Image (tube, rainbow, N blue to C red):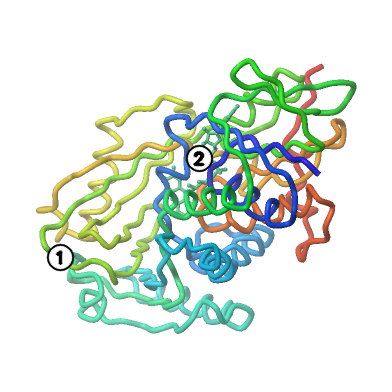
Amino acid sequence: MKVIIIGSGIVGASAAYHLVKNNTEVMMIDKNHQGAATSAGAGIVCPWISSVEDADWYKIAKQGANYYPELISQLKEDNEENVGYKKVGALRIGTDSDELDRIENEVRTKQKDAPELGDIERLTPTEARELFPPLHEGMEAVFVSGAARVDGRLITDAMKRAAQKHGAKLVNGEAELIHERGRITGARVNGEKFYADAVLLTAGAWSQKLLAPIGIDLKVESQRGQIAHIKLSATDTSNWPVVLPKGSHYMLAFDDSRIVAGATRETGAGFDYRTTVGGVHEVTTEALSVAPGLAEGTLQEVRVGFRPLGPDVLPILGELDNVKDVVVATGLGASGLTMGPYVGALAASIVTGEEVDLDLTAYNPMRAIKITN
Ligand code: FAD
């Protein structure tokens, strides 16, 4: 079987890796658009503390987090160890003890079916600051030890390299679909046509543009996210936990004395690849309000990424009713680094017709589609 994969962000790279290891001939096509979400994403993997209240979202996000250790051991067998994944734990911080009590209880309930979330501890402000020193003095916390951070660029590059070691090909360029008699038969790129038995669309926020020429309006839009990278001087941040205040902003640390503070959620900004004054103001103000100790850090970089935002919080995953030999895997929104590798593996199984261990009904792409001709 031959499969063309359009888009090799975290979802496409994972699908390619799983397909090629399953004796499928794979061609990845990627344009490397500015603002690919995987390259800008923060990398928090902690579905057990989230403002999203949707059972189908939780199911797939939980599986996604749980899938990482397995993926990492597979990549290790392929000599890919620079994956940027580490279980550092997460602090849900706050000043309202009653609210933290409620969150602690919720996480304890989830722990029964999710032992991978690790230990749960209630921390005093002093204990919380021992783990994340720039924090404001008055912040209590609920600590969840199984939360992780992942560098989206490193893990995706590792999966792509591993897929290529197993024989996958990678073509750089912008793909267009070849649509013949109700089937997607391949893709056109750099003036050349390539044919396959199936085409997998993992084109992130660009998925709508890819399907529009064949009369399919996929409800996926770009949500711009701006995220600040702050360098601290001579500080070992390698074991600092993820910090989750109330709301959608957060912080996490990477090994090289770097704190990442994010992120804006700019629906309607389209593909406008810019760092804006308002965006930088928003993320730095939010970060400093809970971690004033970051004020002396150096603002090293602001990354900009386009999240693929579907009509709801759920991924868009599966075949289309009206066009044959195409599978869509996108719409992972703000949770794509958590669930991307797992969703990619599911997409690979859908393409080859293998059974999967999750009921996929809720993620059916037809809920996000309007036929325009
Ligand atoms: P992308 O990574 O965007 O990849 C799509 C690829 O397809 C691109 O490389 C593009 O060039 C290519 N492409 C598109 N069209 C074509 C075409 N026609 N031909 C060829 N190539 C094409 N998630 C979390 O779980 N935790 C987080 O902490 C987190 N933080 C985030 C912070 C920010 C600021 C942002 C922007 C996102 C964050 N996310 C997070 C979400 C996550 O990054 C995304 O959901 C995920 O990376 C989406 O992956 P993808 O593979 O679907 O898309």
Where's the C terminus, which quadrant?
top right
Of circles 1 and 2, the one toward us is 1
Is disc 2 placed on a helix, strand or loop?
strand
- Residue 108's spot in the image, x, y percent? 53, 82
- Residue 25's spot in the image, x, y percent? 73, 44
Query: Would residue 205 appear left or right of 329 to someone viewing this image?
Result: left
Residue position marked by numbered label 2 in the rendering: 307
Is disc 1 placed on a helix, strand or loop?
loop
Q: Quadrant of residue 136?
A: bottom left
Crowd tier of the residue under label 2, counting other residues whose Cα lies within 10 Å: few below 14, some 14–19, many 20 or above? many
State how many labels appear: 2
Mark 2 Cβ inside 8 Å of ligand 1: yes
Where's the N terminus, which quadrant?
top right
Q: Quadrant of residue 5?
A: top right
For the point 40% across and 55% down, the residue is 151
Identify the mark at residue 83; answer none if there is no mark.
Answer: none
Name the amino acid type tagged 1. Thr
Judge by depth and name the residue closer to the eye, 294 or 199. Answer: 199
For the point 48% across and 65% down, the residue is 46
Q: Quadrant of residue 121?
A: bottom left
Residue 152, relative to residue 35: is it above or below?
below
Judge by depth and name the residue closer to the eye, 35 or 170. Answer: 170
Residue 358, relative to residue 113: is it above or below?
above
Name the amino acid type tagged 2. Arg
- Residue 76's spot in the image, x, y percent? 51, 67
Residue position marked by numbered label 1 in the rendering: 235
Judge by depth and name the residue closer to the eye, 68 or 362. Answer: 68
- Residue 127's spot in the image, x, y percent? 24, 81
CA–CA distance between discs 1 and 2? 31 Å
Query: Would residue 68 appear left or right of 21 to someone viewing this image?
Result: left
